[in-house]
Amino acid sequence: MDKSRIGSNFDDFLREEKLLDAVEAAAVKRVLAFQVAQEMKQRQLSKTEMASRMKTSRAAVERLLDPVNTSITLATLGRAAAALGKSLSVGFTERELQRRSAQAARSTVATNQTAKPQATARLKSTRSRS
């Protein structure tokens, strides 16, 4: 047993193995894919209808909904948000805040598939709230 790891957390391990950035990117993508799928389900949109609204192919929608495919562009995310009546918000955050948000999102998705987890990039409603 490697006693140097006793008392450390999983993020420390991932950082030491130079995997933290990839794991966090994958977590954010999983959250976004989950959010898009939930919005589509709520609006009863098929993948074909979503592709039509996004003015793209059904294969592009499949890639968007694939939780392990992290090669989605901001343009694609923006078109998806617009197709769902939402706007896309992307910003930079401090590393520690981002990590906590990603950890919370991973935990929420893992324990409650009906929750709407938060991540550093979120879909926001464009409808005015009265």
Image: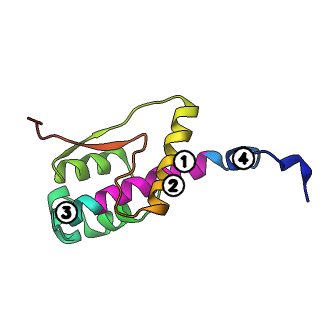
Magenta: predominant secondary structure element? helix
Residue positioned 25% across, 66% down in the render? 57
- Rendered image: mark on residue 107: 2
- Tag 4: residue type? Asn
Disc 1, disc 2: CB below 8 Å? yes
Q: CA distance from mark 3 to mark 4?
A: 37 Å
The earlier-in-sequence mark between 3 and 2 is: 3
Place of residue 21 in the rendered image (x, y in percent of width and height, measured from the top left): 60, 45
Q: Which corner quadrant of the image does residue 55 belong to?
A: bottom left
State yes or no: discs 3 and 4 in contact (Cβ < 8 Å).
Answer: no
Query: In the displayed structure, would residue 80 be above or below residue 12?
Result: below
Residue visible at 56% across and 40% down in the picture: 99
Q: Is residue 52 left or right of residue 92?
A: left
Mark 3 closeness class: few <14, some 14–19, many ≥20 residues within 10 Å: few
Quarter of the N terminus within the rendering: bottom right
Q: Which mark is residue 42?
A: 3
Question: Which badge, 3 or 4, is on the more N-terminal residue?
Answer: 4
